[in-house]
Amino acid sequence: MRFDRPFEQYVQGETFKTRGRTVTEADIVHFAGVSGDFFPLHVDERYAQTTRFGERIAHGMLTLSLATGLYVLSPDYVIAFYGLDRVRFLKPVLIGDTLHLEGEVIDLKDRGEAGLVSVRQQIMCGEEVVVTAVIHMLVKKGHASDRL
Amino acid sequence: MRFDRPFEQYVQGETFKTRGRTVTEADIVHFAGVSGDFFPLHVDERYAQTTRFGERIAHGMLTLSLATGLYVLSPDYVIAFYGLDRVRFLKPVLIGDTLHLEGEVIDLKDRGEAGLVSVRQQIMCGEEVVVTAVIHMLVKKGHASDRL
Amino acid sequence: MRFDRPFEQYVQGETFKTRGRTVTEADIVHFAGVSGDFFPLHVDERYAQTTRFGERIAHGMLTLSLATGLYVLSPDYVIAFYGLDRVRFLKPVLIGDTLHLEGEVIDLKDRGEAGLVSVRQQIMCGEEVVVTAVIHMLVKKGHASDRL
Amino acid sequence: MRFDRPFEQYVQGETFKTRGRTVTEADIVHFAGVSGDFFPLHVDERYAQTTRFGERIAHGMLTLSLATGLYVLSPDYVIAFYGLDRVRFLKPVLIGDTLHLEGEVIDLKDRGEAGLVSVRQQIMCGEEVVVTAVIHMLVKKGHASDRL
Amino acid sequence: MRFDRPFEQYVQGETFKTRGRTVTEADIVHFAGVSGDFFPLHVDERYAQTTRFGERIAHGMLTLSLATGLYVLSPDYVIAFYGLDRVRFLKPVLIGDTLHLEGEVIDLKDRGEAGLVSVRQQIMCGEEVVVTAVIHMLVKKGHASDRL
Amino acid sequence: MRFDRPFEQYVQGETFKTRGRTVTEADIVHFAGVSGDFFPLHVDERYAQTTRFGERIAHGMLTLSLATGLYVLSPDYVIAFYGLDRVRFLKPVLIGDTLHLEGEVIDLKDRGEAGLVSVRQQIMCGEEVVVTAVIHMLVKKGHASDRL
């Protein structure tokens, strides 16, 4: 999804598909370090083997964070990340999985000088949906400054 | 909040307050690196000064990720992070802000051999709410294995 | 080991076992970067293959550092890390090894308003001791502030 | 190569070979995070498999950056890194490749109180040249302060 | 600069200016860790104060690496980073400097099914040029696959 | 201290002083992430202000880890890090402190084909000793392979 245009140029129902990113063991190790979440399901292979997952899995918040990096966010139009709704971690994300996003613009709300673009986002591992969420982005209206 | 007991031991309306963590410039730099989100509001001081925020701010997802590290999650009882609802980024988080969590158990759903504990979470900077969210944690029932 | 109580509540001879953490290649790469120790045994696979170890091994100080992260340290009771004695790196720690701690309280010294708790710590890889050390923790006495 | 002596002690034609360093997946993940270069050839395994390279490769700038860490730079003699010329990325560097440097002093330029030492540097993976470059280092002349 | 089109669509003399990025102390610490270059001018404030620079400065290779992250590289058109020429580190980059790129396409070379786009790149700190370089990018010709 | 020679060439009583390294906020944030030690004295400025230290301090193990990066360890002579004794954290290390090592060889033990070099190490912040320790390094005897 490209947030690279003013609010007036989004269309309800428009769909998108992004490029991908592979989740590595290093990403999980980093994310534990950044978040402080060392839950053993993410950092203790021996423990993870005793769980229903059978191996270490990515933090749900890591998956959600990597997803934000797959959007194209133009500083000429994006004001702020407004919020999320109905985030559900449906399937475990394993080391080596390559994720991409698919989704659809589901709502557009006029907020005066800006607008709220709401997107139903599916984080995909190949053909499989691993996380669903609705994200809301606050976007400028009208003619923005010259693009860099 | 301490997820350190079986499902039967949570009570609707119980409240909590966690210890804190200071958001540093290094955290923002790390999170940009982990997520791939180099939106200039987070990594370009000169740009940030031209925005309504006036300086670089933390990524919303960083704030949310740090919050997960402030919970106590016992592997004897926590099965998985189930999801989030109604996440709203209310105020910008600045470099040097010290955050903690306050919240309340708002819902308990029996799911057979496990239960879903839903918590209304407020990410606080001192007395000010900066992010609100509802999080859902899947927790074991009954007698768990001996605690490490 | 849980340093989550005042000095008076530790008992000489009490034993403990912690949860675990898997040492990854990423941890070794990180630790080289944080410490500045790029000794080729840790970062040069080709060199490591010519040594008695046959492959890259974790830095001794990385193993010791990961161990400190496996303790539960309550800010209500822990004042400071006082020191270490008799640290011996007995066996190499390899990429993929999952470590945990086992140990025993071996000494308790009253220091007026605080006390020194000394623990014999064994860093274990499964059934095997890889590092031994004695660590000393300075702990508050009496009634601490309410726990978060 | 050891930049551990004053300008007068380098000889045109002197050759060198350094110790090595293994390029890990974690290094690529880190470098993407530090540089902000998430080009999918480096972080998207699925995409990389569709390219002429067939798998993820290290960033050219990562390879070049690791090379600078293989020089011995004495602060008693090195003033600054002056520049590079004719950098060519000849072969892809893959996860697990162990790199070292080989090279030759090709030029010495007197600059008054300092001198410019120019080195033709080959980044090697075993017997194979993967990157070539000429680097220029500004080095003190005469008697430096006592070495630490 | 946007490498987001086939070789035929670049024009000799076209100029560009990118968005910016602030160089933080954390970036220098990271880069030391990734590259293994702990030269005291970058990591020893006390030493740095005794030099002509008077304070710690960014590694030249860090500055050059950050610059690569400021290009827009479309995987539909970019094949590989081909090389660099005439890299000169003209001014020290200090903690807190915000850098951006300005430049010009200076050469276009047909290479059969691909083309080489050569760009004179100036890394700017405000109005001041801190690094100059020529970079060469290998770019596809003709009609690429659908853009993500 | 330079471990760059065979066992026979160390002399009891020889002293040394190393170059320095500045402890940054980013180092503390990194070390929390690598070790998993998020004790609030290191990562919660508000909490740290209520303690005897008055501000965030570096982890003792971080200080000790940085120290190992200040030794020169030649792979031609160093076999392994053998152990530590009598590590005492005497003074808090604060953000911005520049540390270096001073010390003395205090013991030499012949171990057949190798030898144990024991060094009393003082981690210094300017003129002040912040950590003391004895470290033991296992070093080759006789003629080593050609130096890289």
Image (spheres, coloured by chain):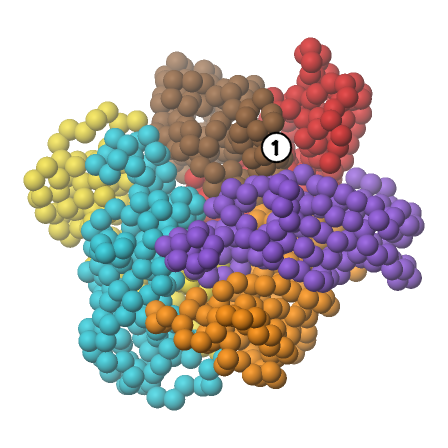
Chain colours: A orange, B purple, C red, D yellow, E cyan, F brown
Across and down, in percent, residue F6 comes to 38, 28
Q: Residue at x 41, y 86 (%)?
A: E144
The residue shown at (24%, 72%) is: E15
Left or right? Give the position of E81 relative to C22. left
The residue pinned by badge 1 equals F47
> Compared to C75, does A89 lie above or below?
below
Crowd band around label 1 with a 10 angstrom C-alpha radius: few (<14), some (14–19), many (20+): many
Using the image, name the chain to which the residue with label 1 belongs. Answer: F
E141 sits left or right of B72 in the view? left
Residue C73 visible in image: yes
The answer to which quarter of the image holds residue C112 is top right
- Element on which disc 1 rests: helix
Q: Is residue B112 left or right of residue B3?
A: right
- Where F87 falls versus E59 (above or below)? above
Q: Quadrant of residue D23?
A: bottom left
Q: Amino acid at mark 1?
A: Tyr
Give the camera-side residue of A78 and A54.
A78
Q: Position of residue E1 (x, y in %)?
A: 32, 70
Where is the C terminus of chain D found, in terms of image quarters?
top left
Write the residue at 37% across / 30% down: F20
Where A84 falls versus D50 (above or below)? above
